[in-house]
Image: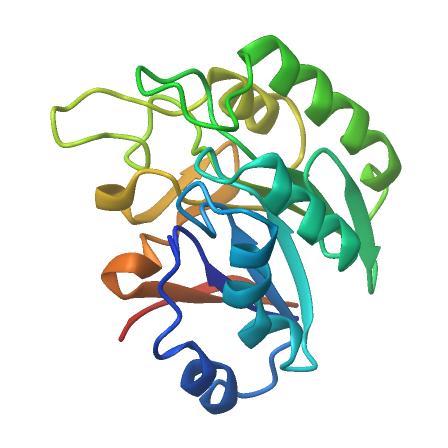
Amino acid sequence: MRLLCFSDIHGRTDGIAGILKSTGNIDIVVLSGDITQKGNYNTAESIMSVFVNSGLRVLAVPGNMDTGEVVRFLEDKRINLHEKNSIIDNIGFIGLGGSVKTPMNTPLEISETEMEQALKRSYGDVKETEVKVLITHTPPKRSSLDRVFAGIHAGSEAVRNFIENNKIDLCICGHIHESGGEEVINGCMCVNTGAYKNGNYCIADIGLKGIKIERRKV
């Protein structure tokens, strides 16, 4: 299965149509949050049209900069994975949007306890699937994927604990624009796609020989 992964679009859509057309054999487009910059329903509809009208399957979680109106749009289009799960070709997908509490009081912030509870609820239905993919906005705490410029780790302890205590094969996240990269935690390939706002995205190929990540930049 080939996943085309974006995060932290923040309203930037130039170049995406070309990426969708030029990337071969896409099975699912994954959006791991911050689709808008505090946008409303109409903003989400405008930004997401390039994905929705592509004919490709889309799974998305909102970011901390996405409002309840954005979540409602994703729900209406049946692509919202926030606090939900989906099983596709015996691959289990678990979603968690938003971020931990921030000093900026952004639209979608969730406590660590709420994150932990949501992940536990979503895991039950996919526990027996062959491969499990976690799509979050917030990266796991204390990793190379959650370090802001000041050196502070701004990820989620609940996300890290979930990966450390359950069999997860792939975690796709974003949120920390400057910390794009990969890190293996408890056998799970964790990938911060980097911000598409800055031209970053990636491809994740899930196959018999494991998971291969290809980072790209427009």
Q: Give the residue displayed 67% in from the left and 77% down from the top.
A: 56
In this view, the residue in front, 10 or 158, is 10
Picture coordinates of residue 160 (x, y %)? 50, 24
Q: How many marks?
A: 0
Judged left or right of residue 102, residue 124 is: right
Is residue 169 among what the camera can see?
no
Q: Which quadrant of the structure image shows residue 59? A: bottom right
Q: Quadrant of the C terminus?
A: bottom left
Relative to residue 199, is residue 141 depicted above or below? Answer: above
Relative to residue 183, is residue 74 depicted above or below? Answer: below
Relative to residue 24, is residue 4 depicted above or below? Answer: above
Picture coordinates of residue 2 (x, y %)? 60, 72
Relative to residue 59, is residue 3 depicted above or below? Answer: below
Is residue 200 among what the camera can see?
yes
In this view, the residue in front, 193 or 44, is 44
Picture coordinates of residue 54 (x, y %)? 63, 82
In this view, the residue in front, 155 or 56, is 56
Judged left or right of residue 87, residue 200 is: left
Q: Give the residue displayed 43% in from the left and 15% down from the top.
A: 101
Picture coordinates of residue 103 (x, y %)? 31, 15
Judged left or right of residue 205, residue 144 is: left
Q: Give the residue displayed 68% in from the left and 52% down from the top.
A: 73
